[in-house]
Amino acid sequence: MELNIGSNIYRNANGILTLEGKEQVVIEARSESPQLLVTADLYDAKGDHVAHLRRNVWAFNFKTRFEIEVSAALSLFTYPAWLKIVDKETAEAVLDINLVKEATVHIANGRLYSHKGQLWDITPHCWRFPGSPAIFGSVQDIRGGAIVIG
């Protein structure tokens, strides 16, 4: 799959996003539906594990802090399919994901914390994370592996 994060392009990725040594987000794109399935561990600013989403279903969601919105399956081969996870405390998108065409997924916006409590900020233009310069306009071939940051 091609995974676009902000303005960055990661080709031949397996859909796994590893932040600071932990697989935190797994994106599955089903082109036959089309449909997005997301598995994610969500943390707060202290690094506490506050929610786990497993293939679009909450395994747990402490104090129902997060809400998931998913596009309705309208008809076969209708793009874009989308999925959005919203933090109800801040009203901000934790992840805003679009399946723009077969095997091409775009994370347009997001604000999520790692298991170490570090904020990872995704905008349409760049991807910012602690201790590193913002990444923008990068194109990488991941060769079937996970996207590993930090």
Image (cartoon, helix red, strand yellow):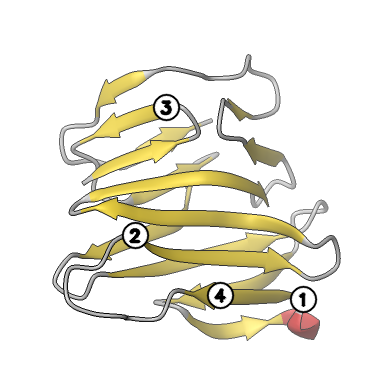
Most extreme residue toward the right, as rendered? 89
**How far apart in space, not on screen, are marks 3 and 2 (Cα)?**
19 Å
**Residue 48 sits above or below residue 115 on the image:** below
Name the element at disc 2.
loop
Question: Circles 3 and 4: CB distance less than 8 Å?
Answer: no
Whether residue 113 appears in this view of the structure is no
Q: Is residue 58 above or below residue 148?
A: below
Residue 70 horizontal/vertical position (percent): 48, 75
Direction from residue 129 to residue 57 in the image, left or right = left
Residue 45 on image: x %, y %: 81, 51
Residue for badge 2: 80
Q: Identify which amino acid the numbered label 1 is placed on.
A: Arg
Q: To which residue does mark 3 refer?
A: 8
* Amino acid tagged 4: Glu
Q: Quadrant of residue 38?
A: bottom left
Q: For this view, does 13 lie left or right of residue 8? A: left
Tell me how far mark 1 sits from mark 2, CA to CA: 27 Å
Pointer 3 or 4: first along the chain: 3
Q: Which residue is mark 1?
A: 65
